[in-house]
Amino acid sequence: MNYGHQLMGKLKKDEYILKSLRSIGRNKEWEVYVVTRIIHLLNDENLEFACQQCVKDKGNDKYYLTDLCFPSLGLYIEVNEIGHSGKKGEIKDKERQEAIQNSISWKQLDIDTYKYDADAKKKVNKTVKDVNKTIEYIVEKIKKRKSEIESSGEKIIWDYNAKYDPKIYINNGSINPEKNISFRYIRHVLRLFGYKKGNIQTGAWRIKCTDEWVWFPKLYINVDKDGVEWINKVENNLKTITMQRKINGVLTETPELLERAIVFAHQKNLLGQVVYRFMGVYKPSKECCAKARAFKDGKWDETNSKKNVYHRVKEKELDLSQYHINNN
């Protein structure tokens, strides 16, 4: 038994838990109380959670934070404090809820820490005792959700190291974009597709003897080491990826389209580590092909050569066994 390896894995998970709770912020008293009480009442080491999980709105460049989420259950908790109340606050919360649900399609559970006092004609904080009743109700819903998933045959285990281990998914034979699957290193992603060498840094890698590519885009506006600005966006509830490129502030022709792209988006996790999240399989749009020019109004229209568009073609599980049949 490799006790040192197990201990290191435990320490990393402990670090993640402590940093998750610390990320809430000392000024959010109710949120700190509610989140920590939920975690303690659940008392479940196999239930992964994240606090202040960052989610990008697909419609624009805004980012929103979930107060507490459980990725393996598809649930997130919103702690509604008195500071959120009022017309402007309610509109903002509604916008955030719509953005989060559009991005990840998770179910929201609410915990209100205030109530309306008819005598005072204003909203006031609830007592801790009253908030505890709501927390206990939410905890039971979380437990029920986990029980429902496991009753269908899926075992929920939070193994911090296994989360980034490609062997787990190779042995399972598939990966699913709905399972929030990420890897720490590009080489670990490529292991899924037969790669056996060491470190590798690349934006895209062609799978041997296929027309498929593994693609690692940064799905946000970013500037590379050469000063080129990339305007990459994911839209339409993860179904569309668009790419544009600017050099010295001017849109230029985009790179040659990938025939079939298995996308692992370049992101950062809660600990600030770069990870590559599985988004699905995408193919270039026929209507907006960078190499296909349209004849319009008596001349060639090359507008499409400055924008690559990909559509997701496989939303469920991707079969990995096909990449290990004749693996050398």
Image (cartoon, helix red, strand yellow):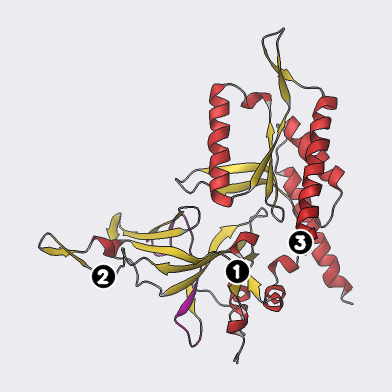
Lateral position of residue 45 relative to residue 299, left or right: right
Kindly indicate whether the residue at mark 3 contacts the one at mark 1 (C-beta within 8 angstroms): no
Q: Amino acid at mark 2?
A: Ala
Q: Amino acid at mark 3?
A: Ser
Location of the N terminus by quadrant is: bottom right
Identify the mark nearer the N-term, 1 or 2.
Answer: 2
**For the residues carrying marks 1 and 2, which lies nearer the camera in this image?**
1
Q: Is residue 148 above or below residue 3?
A: above
Lateral position of residue 284 relative to residue 76, left or right: left
Lateral position of residue 37 relative to residue 66, left or right: right
Residue on which disc 2 sits: 292
Residue on which disc 1 sits: 317
Q: In the orientation shown, which residue stands out farthest toward the top?
A: 119
Q: Amino acid at mark 1?
A: Glu
Q: CA distance from mark 3 to mark 2?
A: 47 Å
Residue 194 visible in the picture: no
Q: Is residue 238 above or below residue 318?
A: above
| Nearer to us in this view, 156 or 263 | 156
Which label sits on residue 78?
none
- Residue occupying image coordinates x 70% and y 10%: 118
Residue on which disc 3 sits: 152
Q: Horizontal and vertical percent for residue 28? A: 71, 32
**For the residues carrying marks 1 and 3, which lies nearer the camera in this image?**
3
Kindly indicate whether the residue at mark 2 contacts the one at mark 3 (C-beta within 8 angstroms): no
In the rendered image, residue 73 lying in the magenta stretch gets the answer: no
Residue 318 visible in the picture: yes
Q: Horizontal and vertical percent for residue 126? A: 77, 22
Find the magenta span and give its range. 208-228
